[in-house]
Amino acid sequence: MIKLRTIDTHQVPVQVFEGGEGENVVVLHDAGGFTAEHPFLLALARHYRVHAPLLPGYGDSVEAPNIRDMLDVTLHSFDVIEALGLNRPLLIGCSLGGMIAAEMAAIAPNDVERLVLIDPAGLWLDAYPVPDVFVLLPHEVPAVLFHDVEKGAKILTRGGDIDDPDFLIPYLINYARTFGMVGKFLFPIPDRGLKDRLYRIKARTRLIWGASDRMFPLPYASAFKAGIRNADLIVIPEAGHLPQLEQPAATVRAIVGF
């Protein structure tokens, strides 16, 4: 069972989903955030003690206007780990969360021992330009993020009917609110200089990538692997940019024992 609690950090209260037993892991979410029913968290909690903080502006958490750039959110994430009372936990980051986790491992290389990056953002390859999700309508997003577009649409809306105004209006409000935070790090492009800091990462690193990622295709996986000295790569079949949602069991298998 995954439960939600609130912890205090130096800047803002932070909501954290927690559950499971065993080794502590901290999971940083993608642009979609987490819920207590998130299949990846539930699968991961069968093997680990999971701590999954929400970024400010997600869920019922307050927004944090003083988190303005990558340095701010990186230091904030270290504050969260300190508030949780954890010492160098296994750090897992998904997409946007992978970008943050990689920055953490680069800025404080002695404080991150093991790192799992699931289709992380943060790089830009001219030959493979990243789609601009900020100009897409919500119904256009699944085609970019998922191998199975129809299944992906149901995942993103959690089964809601986008033709129903009672569902659509709060869905769009939440969509806009969360993308306000995401835009600080990914708009107009997700390049904040991470490529020049990857060499600083000392952590043993596992890259997990969806074989059908249309957001950051496999050449991005190769670029991360080339930039991090101690990294390996596992590719998940029949998964797009969010293998933790499309193939949660396979994604967890790629983590367990790492």
Image: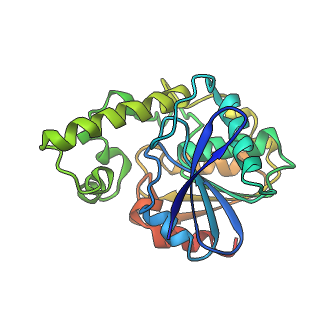
Determine which quarter of the picture holds residue 13. Answer: top right
Image quarter where the C terminus lies is bottom right
Left or right? Give the position of 101 relative to 187.
right
Point out residue 102 in the picture as x, y percentages from the top left corner: 69, 45
Would residue 99 be visible to someone looking at this image?
A: yes
Left or right? Give the position of 35 relative to 46.
left
Q: Which residue is drawn at 83% across and 46% down?
A: 109
The outermost residue toward the right is: 110
Residue 91 vertical position relative to residue 55 in the rendered view, above or below: below
Point out residue 141 in the picture as x, y percentages from the top left corner: 31, 42
Left or right? Give the position of 79 relative to 164.
right
- In this picture the colour scheme is rainbow
Point out residue 244 in the picture as x, y percentages from the top left corner: 47, 61
Q: Residue at x 12, y 43 (%)?
A: 163
Would residue 236 be visible to someone looking at this image?
A: no
Tally of numbered discs: 0
Determine which quarter of the picture holds residue 72. Answer: top right
Point out residue 42 in the picture as x, y percentages from the top left corner: 49, 69
Residue 50 vertical position relative to residue 200 in the rendered view, above or below: below
Residue 198 vertical position relative to residue 19 in the rendered view, above or below: above
